[in-house]
Image: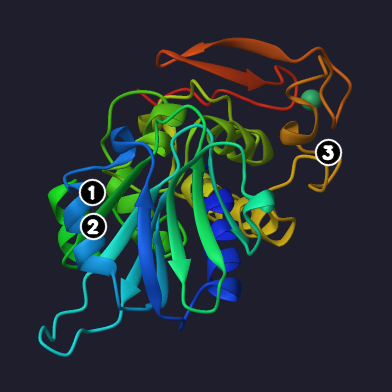
């Protein structure tokens, strides 16, 4: 499931391929991936413009369009990748991916396909990233959040660490996989009560979160390319902790499936 590092990889891919070329057509082959925009409004809103700039917010990718002569506003496309979404930029139809749902055609003969096999992703057209984030109650992007702000947002919260990290209203971008990874490297059990985390633990959590997300981006969010002592490298095939060799635990935390190492990860108790 694409989380912040995956979406950042998609952002970089789009930015290095599809910007600054005039769009000649938009083909919607599956309306179910469209958010609150009809196929015709998408087509009219995008045709003749170019993709100008990219911005990621959590798991959402915003692509700003050029202003149109008659209309000085610069709307943005919003992409959410659901479980299976990704982009492919190509020229020959024979190179099209397997499940293109929306395809953007450019004047230079290239196309950008938004492929989303399970159709849990979404494409929308909005006025601005900020208004979209507000309307959807998205908290700040996890990599744009300061250390004090994270502590502020977690202070006094009930519930498990895993749940807090995944709550997009608190901070945006982290899902099931990276909440486990961050908890693992912070040495905290994912079921740790947020309230039990003291100043030092919160500072450590913040540094670990940044390190995990930034390292994952550098490694292209590829499970085969992340450091070998990461859960991500083994979670789908191993049952042993990549740091200490203990049996990993898989259990439900806040209704989600969590991987953790009972030896490497501790559960600080709330002080009474
Ligand atoms: Zn371990």
- 256 left or right of 213? left
Residue 12: give x, y in percent of width and height: 58, 67
Mark 2 = which residue? 42
Q: Of residues 90 and 222, which is closer to you in this image?
A: 90
Query: Callout 3 environment at 10 Å: few (<14), some (14 to 19), or many (20+)?
Result: few
Residue 177: give x, y in percent of width and height: 58, 32
Residue 131: give x, y in percent of width and height: 15, 61
Q: Secondary structure at mark 1?
A: helix
Mark 1 = which residue? 39
Quarter of the render that holds ligand 1: top right
Is residue 34 visible in the rendered image? The answer is: yes
Q: Which mark is residue 1?
A: none
Q: Splitting the image into 4 quarters, where does residue 65 fall?
A: bottom left
Q: Of residues 24 and 80, which is closer to you in this image?
A: 24
> Is the residue 17 above or below the residue 99 in the image?
below
- 264 left or right of 96? right
Is residue 62 visible in the rendered image? The answer is: no
> Is the residue 53 above or below the residue 28 in the image?
below
Query: Callout 1 environment at 10 Å: few (<14), some (14 to 19), or many (20+)?
Result: some
Identified at 74% across, 27% down, the residue is 264
Q: Secondary structure at mark 2?
A: helix
Q: Does the CB distance between marks 1 and 2 fall below 8 Å? A: yes
- Disc 3 within 8 angstroms of ligand 1 (CB): no
How far apart marks 1 and 2 lie (CA) works out to: 5 Å
Mark 3 = which residue? 229
Q: Of residues 136 and 258, which is closer to you in this image?
A: 136
Residue 25: give x, y in percent of width and height: 36, 64
Screen quadrant of the N terminus: top right
Q: How many marks?
A: 3
Mark with earlier residue (3, 2): 2
How far apart marks 3 and 2 lie (CA) works out to: 44 Å
Screen quadrant of the C terminus: top left
């Amino acid at each position: 499931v694409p989380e912040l590092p995956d979406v950042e990889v998609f952002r970089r891919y789009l930015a290095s391929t599809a910007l600054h070329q005039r769009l000649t057509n938009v083909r919607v082959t599956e309306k179910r991936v469209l958010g609150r925009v009809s196929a015709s409004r998408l087509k009219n809103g995008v045709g003749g413009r170019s993709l100008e700039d990219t911005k990621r917010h959590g798991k959402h990718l915003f692509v700003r369009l050029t202003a149109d002569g008659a209309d000085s506003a610069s709307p943005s496309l919003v992409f959410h990748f659901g479980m299976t979404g990704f982009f492919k930029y190509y020229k020959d139809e024979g190179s099209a991916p397997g499940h293109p749902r929306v395809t953007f055609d450019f004047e230079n003969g290239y196309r950008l396909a938004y492929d989303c096999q399970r159709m849990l992703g979404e494409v929308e057209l909005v006025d601005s990233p900020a208004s979209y984030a507000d309307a959807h109650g998205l908290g700040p992007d996890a990599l744009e959040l300061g250390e004090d702000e994270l502590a502020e947002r977690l202070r006094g919260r009930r519930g498990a660490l895993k749940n807090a990290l995944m709550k997009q209203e608190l901070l945006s971008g982290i899902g099931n996989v990276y909440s486990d990874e961050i908890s693992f490297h912070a040495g905290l059990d994912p079921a740790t009560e947020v309230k039990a985390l003291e100043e030092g633990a919160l500072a450590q959590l913040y540094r670990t979160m940044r390190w995990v997300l930034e390292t994952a981006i550098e490694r292209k969010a590829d499970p085969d390319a992340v450091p070998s002592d990461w859960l991500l490298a083994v979670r789908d095939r191993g049952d042993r902790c990549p740091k200490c060799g203990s049996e990993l635990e898989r259990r439900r935390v806040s209704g989600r499936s969590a991987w953790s190492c009972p030896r490497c990860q501790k559960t600080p108790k709330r002080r009474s």
